[in-house]
Amino acid sequence: MTQNEQRTKQGLNPLTWKRGVWLLFAGLVVWCGLSVAQPQPPAGLPPDFFQKLAATHRPSELTLRQVMQEMLADLQSVITGIALDNKEQVAEAAQRLGTHKMPKGGLLPYLPADKQDQLGVLPAMESIIGGGAQKIIAAAKEGDMAAVAQQITPLLQGCVTCHALFRGTPGVVSLPAGATPMKP
């Protein structure tokens, strides 16, 4: 005799029983979801920092290194646009640069453990890159390539600040524990 036949013999409707189990399960999920404390943002960051990032940056399946390669290509496109006096190229590349993709998993997994206490600089870096890109876009739309060129230096300072936070020693490749470098 199957379980459904046994429940029917006992006067229990199998569909009612299954609905009851699902309702109990759904209630448990809701209760657990409401009772779990929401994660707090890391110290030194505004509470809405990651929400603002999510609103202005596109999610991706790229690694941080791949995102950086795209940002480098966009920066090079801005510089090429300045040299060619191509305001559309400059504005489009600066737009991509200012709203660059987020790496898979967000930023924190890529931050070295010994630098977790320096997260407070992230909003300033975001302001330098995003704000600098907006200034470049505005100047490019006006056709003022001299003003665009003047904005490159502060933008590059934002790059250097970010690299100082996320990189280890320049020129030294960080490998996960137990990994060995490839032999040529």
Image (cartoon, helix red, strand yellow):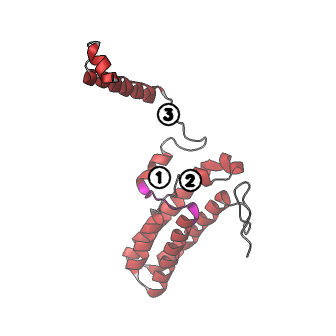
In the rendered structure, which amino acid carries the disc numbered 1? Leu
Query: In what element is the residue under mark 3?
Result: loop
User: In this view of the protein, which residue sits in the foreground, 15 or 127?
Assistant: 15
Marker disc for residue 38: 3
Give the spatial CA distance, label 2 vs label 3: 19 Å
Q: Are marks 1 and 3 in contact (CB under 8 Å)?
A: no
Which residues fall within the magenta stretch? 56-65
* Mark 2 residue crowding within 10 angstroms, few (<14) / some (14–19) / many (20+): some
Residue that extends furthest to the bottom in the rendered view of this protein: 84
The secondary structure that most of the magenta stretch takes on is loop
Q: Can you give x and y, in whole percent of width and height, for residue 11 in the image?
A: 26, 13
- Identify residue for label 1: 53
Q: Of callouts 2 and 3, which one flags the residue occurring earlier in the amino acid sequence?
A: 3
- Of tags 1 and 3, the one toward the viewer is 3
Residue 180 location in percent, x, y?
Answer: 74, 63
Cα–Cα gap, marks 2 and 1? 10 Å
- Cα gap from disc 1 to disc 3, whole angstroms: 18 Å
Q: Which mark is residue 107?
A: 2
Q: Dot 1: within a 10 Å radius of its alpha carbon, few (fewer than 14), some, or many (20 or more) residues? A: some
Which type of secondary structure does the marked residue at label 2 adopt?
A: loop
Residue 67 locus on image (x, y percent): 53, 65
Mark before the other along the chain sequence, 1 or 3: 3
Residue at x 48%, y 59% (from the top left corner): 61
